[in-house]
Amino acid sequence: MHDIHVVDLSRLQFALTALYHYLFVPLTLGMSFLLAAMETVYVTTGREIYKKITQFWSKLFLINFALGVATGLTMEFEFGTNWSFYSSFVGDIFGAPLAIEGLMAFFMESTFVGLMVFGWGRLRRGQHLAVTYLVALGSNLSALWILIANSFMQAPTGAHFNPVTMRMELTSLSDLIFSHDAQAKFVHTSIAGYVTAAIFVAGVSAWYLLKNRHTELARRSFRMAVLFGALATVGVITLGDALGFVGAQAQPTKLAAMEGLWKTEPAPMPFNLVAFPSQQEHVNRGAIQVPYVLSLLVTHSLTGSVPGFDQLEQQATARIRDGIPAVAALQTLSAKPNDADALAQFQAHEKDLGYGFLLQRYAPDVTAATDAEVADAARDAIPQVAPVFWSFRVMVVLGLAMLAYFVMAVIYTMRNRVERKRWFLKLAVWMIPVPFLANEAGWLVAELGRQPWTVYGMLPTWMSASTHSVGYMAFSLIGFVTLYTVFIAIEMYLMVRTIRRGPDDDHAGVIPHDRLHADRLAGYAEG
């Protein structure tokens, strides 16, 4: 039996390291394609200003990319150190996309990043542009494989549990890659990165315009960024709706948590605009509802209904009881792999094996479980509602705010009025953190809403952690948080220093040494 404190500390450590790492990822995804767009304009027009624009933003991309790789490396090791049972249980499936992602990130992506940075003047224009597009492609393909692995945790497909080896085994790579959740999540996440990069570039450009520095570069960068971002924001909102529709089919408990649905209501269902969910009482306090909207959003009709936790808990109870024979048969097979009766019993109930595992937290001998223990396990099938509910609303509100911002930005920049709107330029600078907060909120919705599962419906989180001591976990948690805080500080320092220095070369604004020496000699002669 796992110490629940060790499980909680393992979850907290991975959550914090993932949230730190996810500060770097969206900017890398978006900046890579924005750089490709900027360089395309340079190659097609031949105007040197666009070469200067591309080279400057490449510096900021490189800083973010390097620290993103550094923070991502340690996360992959955490699967082995802190989640050893999970790694054993799904290693055959999870290992393949992680290995391919490593090839994408460290062979393809890193190689072409080097060529992109040091290839100016060594490669012809078309060759360098091709390299920049390959960097963008590599960055996004790297994200694709990570999201395929994550999507298996959200909606497992293409795999089958082998009761002899006690492991999940890959049965169809194509089903794993082309699952609805993986494809919807990849497109949504990638376009969210494009929004992040657009707001970052627009914000820094607005700062230059406010300071009346590098105005030509800033004006052109701002226009390209907001046009890029406006299209991306529409896409991310539209595809977010599609992802929600897919998620509603795969994880009804997550959807119920996002919407605060404690009880199933007849259609058309109202949308909880604001509410304060109570986990103990299974009610929402202070709810403000909008009639009909939930049915329209989730089912795209006025006749569709969404199950609430009352119905979902009943379903979990039935599946837990059906999972008891599967766990009992699995225990027999672990001792007698050739027991035909046990194998037949397992195959008849294997679809509910994960729910039987949920019960083992309360009743190690599931065949002797009481009704109270079954009820406790069924309640565990409900995630913590309040953090999922509010994270979802933060993400949506920030998404709509970014859409409104881009609409105004496009209008002002197309009318060449943005430089006269100093209040809007200041707003653009303050908008820089907004997409990062929206991305973090989206990650919380995805991961907290999946609980209590590591692999939804198959492997509970309480079983997945390694058997460390509480002291070890506390020590490693402090170490990781300290390390990642240092990474964030380095990122901020390098970014701010590069932005303050501006897009000129390293000696911009500094009197060359030979000129300084000549000026001093002239001063001495005059004296």
Image (cartoon, rainbow, N blue to C red):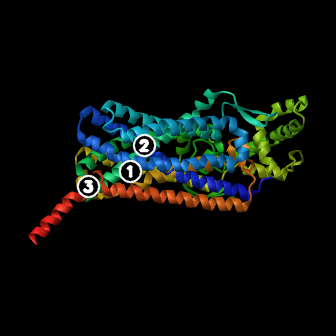
The mark found on residue 30 in the picture is: 2
The mark found on residue 508 in the picture is: 3
Q: Of helix, strand and loop, which one carries label 2?
A: helix
Task: Say whether disc 1 or disc 2 marks the residue closer to the N-terminus.
Answer: 2
Front in this rendered view, residue 116 or 210: 116
Residue at mark 1 to residue at mark 2: CA–CA distance: 10 Å
- Amino acid marked by disc 1: Phe
The mark found on residue 200 in the picture is: 1
Q: Is residue 53 left or right of residue 20?
A: left
Front in this rendered view, residue 505 or 242: 505
Residue 237 placed where, x, y %?
46, 42
Observer-side mark, 1 or 3, equals 3
Q: Of helix, strand and loop, which one carries label 3?
A: loop
How packed is label 3: few (under 14 Cα within 10 Å), some, or many (20 or more)?
few
- Amino acid marked by disc 2: Gly
Q: Of helix, strand and loop, which one carries label 1?
A: helix
Task: Identify which residue is drawn at 19% across, 58% down.
Answer: 515
How packed is label 2: few (under 14 Cα within 10 Å), some, or many (20 or more)?
many
Residue 473 placed where, x, y %?
69, 59
